[in-house]
Image (cartoon, rainbow, N blue to C red):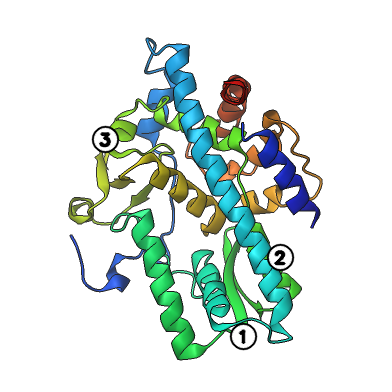
Amino acid sequence: MKVLHVIMVFVLICSCGKKTDLEDNKLNVTSDVFMASQENYSLSKLNDVPNLNTDLKEQFVCKINKIVNSINFEILLERNQFINLIERISSNEINHSEKEWLVEMLMKYRLIDKDKYFYSVTTYTSNEISNLLKKESKNYYKRNGLPQSCKYVSYNNKKFLTITKPLDSIECKEEFLRRAQVIAPGMAVTQATLESAWGNSRFAIEGNNLFGLQFRFSDPSEVLTRKYCLKAKQAPNRCVFKFINMDDAVREYYRFLNAGTYQPQFRKIRGREDIQITSCNDASTMIQGLTNYAENNNYISDVLQRMDSVCQMINNCLEN
């Protein structure tokens, strides 16, 4: 596909209360809404760290950029493997372990029972979620074999549409590729600097939350019972996600954009074949898809305004 080729070029250039029942630990089906934290965002926008020198900012940028590129490479491998296996299904040339892997990918990107396997980061680490998916995919395949179809929810014009297509159909393949796709480092790193005040906001320091990701509970007491929650001072019912490290924070950011119910617009714009990624600044088109990311109406313009300086730092990472 043309998109895959474009992205490969892009990666090269920009390398620049514990519960026993798993069901109770998943996010509510009708409330899968994550938004940029206003407390995080206001800190970064007001330049909360005036004494932070350029070297420290560049160190932060280079660290996040390295994580982003590592995850992007993993996704490219997933895409290629998925395409290869889907094309071999009809001839029955794939083995049991490959079928289990396919089931795992369908679970990861919410193409089987969208919420059943979408484990909450308020209870599990990224590594624990990965291990749970491997376990669940094996159990699923043992019980049901390879699914005959993919099923996903599309959100458009404030309406949810449930779509079911044959597993080896073009539609299923295209939906997987829309979800299992890389994110431009220029966009991801710029958002991290903006949302976390260059890694110095309260949520970044106390919980490695670099992207303002959070979940709103109807009952504020839920925030206190969750293992990986930070309480927002101005909104006691909000659980601002707490991560064990920066890598986990970036991986959840990817999971939010690539599999989040409210992010089809972002995935649609990112998947356009006319997007040409030849430099860090070309992430500007992808950024236009962040309409449902933050509560601030000027969020997209704020990201775009900062991106040029961040991209220069990313280029410096490559030179050093």
- Kindly identify the residue that appears in the image at 67 percent across and 74 percent down: 85
| Residue 68, image x, y percentages | 53, 41
Q: Nearer the viewer, residue 59 or 35?
A: 59
Q: Which residue is mark 3?
A: 206
Three-letter amino acid code of the residue under disc 3: Glu
Q: Which residue is mark 2?
A: 174
Vertical relation: 193 (above or below) 132: above
Vertical relation: 278 (above or below) 50: below
Query: Which part of the image, by quadrant, shows the C terminus?
Result: top right
Horizontal side of residue 234 vs 265, given as left or right: left
Q: Quadrant of residue 79?
A: bottom right
Label 3 crowding class (10 Å Cα cut-off): few <14, some 14-19, many 20+? few
Q: Quadrant of residue 188?
A: top right
How far, Cα to Cα, is label 2 from label 1?
A: 16 Å
| Residue 139, image x, y percentages | 41, 82
Q: Which residue is mark 1?
A: 148
Three-letter amino acid code of the residue under disc 2: Glu
Label 1 crowding class (10 Å Cα cut-off): few <14, some 14-19, many 20+? few
